[in-house]
Amino acid sequence: MTETPDFTRDELMEVNAARALAGAKTCFVGIGLPSTAANLARATVNPGLVLIYESGTIGSKPTRLPLSIGDGELAETADSVVPVPEMFNYWLQGGRIDVGFLGAAQVDAYANINTTVIDRGPDKPEGRLPGAGGAPEIASNCGRVLMVLRHSTRSFVHKLDFVTTMGHGSGPGDRTKLGMPGAGPVAVITDLGILRPDPATAELTLTELHPGVTVEQVRAATGWDLAVAGTVGTTEPPTPDELAALRALKAAGKEPR
């Protein structure tokens, strides 16, 4: 799919990621694309969504996209700020958060995540990434997990260079064996389409394409033999209101403070 005068691939991905939060009550938000999607959801499909960040802010209502979990506006606009140990021990590990929204540097066929190191090849040092943060606990304990990232063979890999965060392990039953209470990843939203774990195998399967994208394009951008649903849907393009809200959030982040 090529960019159109109306919207870009990134905007299509971000809008569909926001739509995935319709009906959710609470969301543990990762920085970057997940934060864009979660804040857009508050501005469009889910005004009552409670945004929770790893720094201990509950009910943040930023007027622009936060730069990090330590962005002061998250605390200034929050309903409550709690200590980080309380955030993890009581709220997250206590099963009190509906949705976790994560990004990834690499993801495999079972929605396992790498955000730690990248193998750059022979005689080259490892590429160091930000690391785990709270992602392992988020993926383990939230009711369900959504993921958003751009689709390429660099990101969608046959084998992770490092397993930072477990999605569905090596298949059905792995999460139960490890006592993980949450359902794990239920959708991976990209700039090409949406992948969901097969109910029987837990392997990510292409279920929806964005307008103008073909199955062959998605397969070519995936580092394994991607499974495709028997019937593949097509996502709805962004509405003018969704695009206006998204662009306003991004523009606010560029204004001098």
Image (spheres, helix red, strand yellow):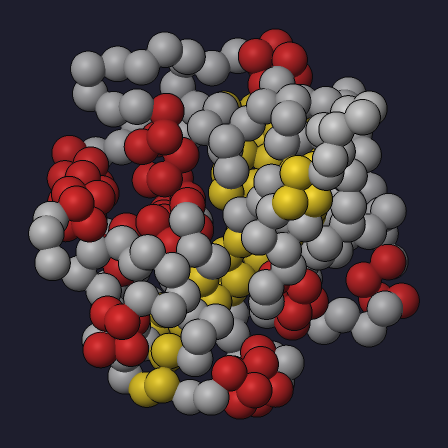
Residue 232: image location, x then y, percent? 57, 24
Residue 13: image location, x then y, percent? 40, 34
Picture layout, residue 231 above or below residue 101? above
Q: Which quadrant holds the C terminus? A: bottom left
Asked where in the image residue 156 lies, by quadrant, the reply is top right
Q: Which quadrant holds the N terminus? A: top left
Nearer to the camera, 66 or 237: 66
Picture layout, residue 105 above or below residue 12? below
Nearer to the camera, 256 or 253: 256
Nearer to the camera, 144 or 64: 64
Q: Residue at x 85, y 47 (%)?
A: 171
Residue 128: image location, x then y, percent? 64, 45
Q: Residue at x 29, y 77 (%)?
A: 75
Q: Is residue 235 left or right of residue 5?
A: right
Q: Is residue 65 visible?
A: yes
Q: Is residue 144 visible?
A: no
Asked where in the image residue 158 lies, by quadrant, the reply is top right
